[in-house]
Image (spheres, grey):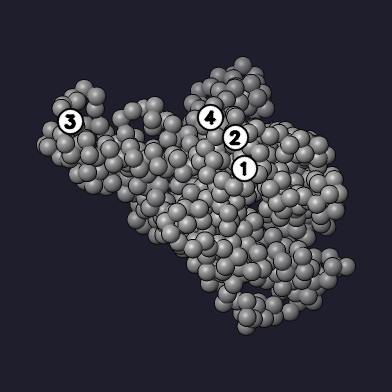
Amino acid sequence: MKGNRIKKSREDIIFDVVSYTIISLLILVCFYPMWYVFCASFTDPTIVAKCKGVLLWPQKINLDAYRRVFSNPEIWTGYKNTLIYTVAGTLLNVMLTAMLAYALSRKNVLLKKPLTFMISFTMFFNGGMIPTYLVVKSLGLLDHRFAVILPGLVQVFNFIIMRTQFESIPDALEEAAKIDGANQWSIFWRIYLPVSSTSLAVMTLFYAVNHWNGWMNAMLYLPNTPELHPLALVTRGIVVSSASAAMSEGAALTQEMADAIKYATIIVSTLPILCLYPFLQKYFTKGVMVGSVKG
Amino acid sequence: MQAKVADKTSAAGRRAKTHPKTPLPQRLGRDFKRNWILYLMALPALIYFIVYCYAPMAGLYIAVSDFKIAGGLFDGKFVGFKYLNEFFHSYYFGRLLRNTLVLSLETLAFGFPVPIIFALVLNEVRSTKFKKLAQTITYMPHFISIVVICGLVTNFFSMNGLINTIIQAFGGEPIAFLSEPKWFRTVYVGSEVWQSFGWDSVVFLAALAGIDLEQFEAAKLDGASRWQTIWHISLPSILPTVVTMLLMRLGHVMSIGFEKVFNLYSPATYETADIIATFVYREGILGANYSKAAAIGLFNSAINLILVVTMNKVSKKLTESSLW
């Protein structure tokens, strides 16, 4: 399109002005809320209370809220737990999904079709919250770390991404390795996995973000062990159900300070994602593309 | 229904590939011997699906029996559709069904066109840098925890929040968005569109990127305006994608997310906010009325299944591409 850039007509200019304005507005609408919280978390709480939602820059820097957030042991254990769940969970997710996808992407496997159907069916029907809860309970997993790691161990969407990827690798690669005497595991481990590094990265990111943001499994399955709660659930307690009073060290907390603590907590729990996200965005987009080409 | 189709195709495939006369157990034995490593690799994941997906499906037996906490999942006395019937005749049934459907359909009505329009407009932007910036920032809310999103929503819609500041700037009266039932839907749908329009546009942008550039050039030579190219080239080209996505969304009308409603509603707004999923949570997990809650959940999942399968059939007919 660049080649034949003739003189812009008036209509073209109007079109450009309108489209750039619309998109700029949408950018602003998506950016401002996080920016506001970021600014508000550093600003003197009394100023934030007066600004009524309009704050374009941090004013009168005040780090009290952060001091309170960081002196709250719940935040630290939350961070630790989230790291454990994210690292261990993602590792298991990725391994299991890749192994399953590889096994069901091979051509000469007799049970491939029924097993694939069995897996896909779970996308359309499930037992629901209560029976799942009772199964977890009867397995004795309540109030155990595994209760948070195990649900969603293999996601069908990611399984499809990986299977599509493995199927796209030419058979010649497998044949050659077989002639060299490699067994199915080493073909998977030494050839198919390294070749699929991009899809693996995509899948890892999706799983990791889910673990990082996850709170519901912990709420359901860790009712009596707050010391195992992930950061997102701790954040929920502070931000959504306003439990910031717990941080006031006995004294009653002013509304302003409670709000400031909310802002700081949001930043502390979201910062890792916000910092990494711009660099990883292209991988996420890629994942959606692979997933939308159904296998 | 679906099972039959899968059986037929796999049976046909097997017949074509292997000797037709070898009995199944023998072929299976040979297959296990040849592919035992593959089956071993699939095993952990299969165990997961059995424990976390199929065991709960079997556990739905509690929806038609009198489950006692002391006993096992299958020890309850069979009572048929007693709990389902109770639910149908209860005061909550109409309210929960209405709220679930209304929230879901309103989100669809507003949330579906926005990403398409956004993608069409963004596709016309020539500056790559500006495009990248717009994509990065509008996708971002999708990756932020729902907990934080709801925290933001609560803050911005509060009496002292930005939305009320704007309303007052235009001379209006401040509104208690979060405690008045009639405003819950607006808050829910608005924030839902805000959070997902960017990310939902990815699929449409990709479809737009796939259009042959020659078509645009030809239109330009013929003197078509930008608006005309959008209307006559871009939009028709992505129409199959649009239809597929719409059917997919329609199939999931009943599977509206628990997490967001749960973090935004309060007893004051139950009238318009309480959906089947949140009710199941309160009845089952908090109230320990397991059989009743499971029955209500089963009702929801069953409708879900019917919708998804129907929409997939329609999609197959319309676009010759299935959703799975």
Q: Say few, some or many: other residues with alpha carbon within 10 Å of mark 4 (under 14 / 14 to 19 / 20 or more).
A: some
Which residue sits at x=60%, y=51%? Answer: B155
Which residue sits at x=69%, y=60%? Answer: A129
Instruction: Name the front one of labels 2 and 4.
Output: 2
Which residue sits at x=60%, y=29%? Answer: A275
Q: Position of residue B176 (x, y in %)?
A: 57, 63
Q: Give amino acid for label 3.
A: Lys
Q: Position of residue A201 (x, y in %)?
A: 58, 29
Which residue sits at x=48%, y=36%? Answer: B137
Residue B107, numbered label: none
**Same chain assignment for discs 2 and 4:** yes
Q: CA distance from mark 1 to mark 3?
A: 48 Å
Residue A278, numbered label: 4
Q: Tell which circle, 1 or 3, labels the residue nearer the N-terminal end.
A: 3
Which residue is tagged 1? Answer: A47
Answer above or below: position of A39 versus A195.
below
Q: Are marks 1 and 2 in contact (CB under 8 Å)?
A: yes
Q: Give amino acid for label 2.
A: Gln
Instruction: Name the front one of labels 1 and 3.
Output: 1
Q: Chain of mark 4?
A: A
Q: Are marks 3 and 4 in contact (CB under 8 Å)?
A: no
Q: Chain of mark 3?
A: A
Which residue is tagged 2? Answer: A59
Q: Tell which circle, 4 or 1, labels the residue nearer the N-terminal end.
A: 1
- In the picture as drawn, the residue positioned furthest to the top comes out as A180
Q: In the picture, residue B93 is in which quadrant?
A: bottom right
Answer above or below: position of B31 versus A7.
below
Looking at the picture, tell me which residue is in the foreground, A181 or B53: B53
